[in-house]
Image (cartoon, rainbow, N blue to C red):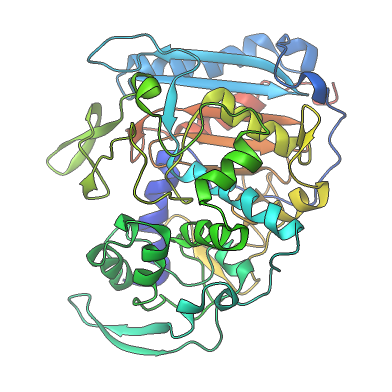
Amino acid sequence: MHRRAYFAATLGAVLLAAGVQPVLAADAAAAPAKPEATALTTTTTPEAVGFDSGRLKKLDDYMAKTVSDGRVAGMTTLLARHGKVVEFKTYGKTSLATGQAMPKDEIFRIYSMSKPLTGVAMMILFEQGKWRLDDPVTRYVPEFKNLKVMVEADKDGKITKVEDMKRPPTMREIMSHTAGFGYGLGDKHPVDKLYREKKVLGATGLHEMIERTATIPLMYQPGTDWSYSSVVDIQGYIVEKLSGKPFGEFLQENVFGPLKMKDTGFYTGPAKASRLAEVYAGERVNDKETGRIVEAKTLFSGDMPDYAKPPLMESGGGGLLSTTMDYARFCQMMLNKGVLDGVRILSPASVELMDTNVIPGNVLVNNNGSIGIRFNEAVGFGLDFMVVNDPRRAGSLEGKNTMSWGGAAGTWFWIDPTNDVFFVGMIQRMGGTGGDDLGTMARTLTYQALLHPEK
């Protein structure tokens, strides 16, 4: 399969599950002043911050119908503007088996929404002068010095020809998925088949993950293409190595603790295990997924982990759990240019760097399997975030420089510095919602209600 077609097949499933539509961005606009000392501790009426309540009800009704139609068991959504909560809604149940109503503090598997948090950890070390964007990754991961690059594979997906790297991947490339590494979420690409066979994501620790990765060729020469990959797990290893601390400990001390993200981490522990929402998958009939849901038994061909216990490997790419309000506090910090409640995590310049497209102009991506879009003209990607270069050209209503991503169980978020808005949505359905993706609908229904953005 061609790399670009493969990208569409693999990333498309992740984006739809995450509720993220590839949308675009441009120059950062100065956001209005925000009441940082009281961020997210107060609520406001929609009209006070430019929304129309009647039009915003379309958002609420759509999300409620998604639950009543049986596409998801339950959901939470949080919309904020100018540091105040406009809406914090819950819908449905945490579990169809127990029938418990969805509470606001439910814990969710956020999967790839872990990636921006890992990116912030990397940027903390960047600000300490521990690494630079154009450093070769081999400076920090010497195990990658002898990586090869796949050239050809036979009809059975076995790699038959490799070549030497023309140069090692850079740190910029491992933070923007242009380094050439595989992932193993699917098995259609020969490199991903090897990731699955060698159980890269099933390693017993980050160093073992690095060692297994070092035995597998890259998909392409570094910097010449874009493919969703395990690079954020590699970042987690680099955080450990440069900080001298276990990855989870570094995150707790430098991100979760300072931001008061009290329920975010790689496992719940026994005391909080009952607060973890049940995860579901779409029911399959004749190889077609229906809108109905069934209990999910496996994750990417492996058994579901026991989140009450510490994981064998702390995955920066997809291992974190969080709540809606915890993740909202992270979003508000990014919207505030690196500070929340008087606690600074990053400098404004570092946040702007993360929100700047770094994809080379020669890299094209098939975002829907047929249409090639230049990343720097349409769908931009910064440092562990998708960014928006030109939203109207992309057919989107959000503001320029909106940062976003999502998770494989349907969680999604966006951070819009132009309109001083962020949104967090949480569900637990693997691989999508059996209909329109929620991230795209949430964007449309949110911004059609923002009638007075000047407020």
Q: Residue at x 25, y 11 (%)?
A: 98
* Residue farthest along the front direction in this orientation: 244
Q: Nearer the viewer, residue 58 or 106?
A: 106
Q: Nearer the viewer, residue 52 or 297?
A: 297
Q: Residue at x 36, y 65 (%)?
A: 208
- Residue 232 placed where, x, y %? 50, 57
- Residue 430 placed where, x, y %? 32, 37
- Residue 261 placed where, x, y %? 59, 29
* Residue farthest along the left direction in this orientation: 286
Q: Is residue 423 above or below residue 58?
A: below
Drawn side of residue 382 relative to residue 364, left or right = right
Drawn side of residue 137 relative to residue 335, left or right = left
Instruction: Please tell me in which quadrant of the rendered image residue 215 appears.
Output: bottom left
Asked if residue 284 can be seen in this view, the reply is yes
Q: Nearer the viewer, residue 198 or 26?
A: 198
Asked if residue 24 can be seen in this view, the reply is no
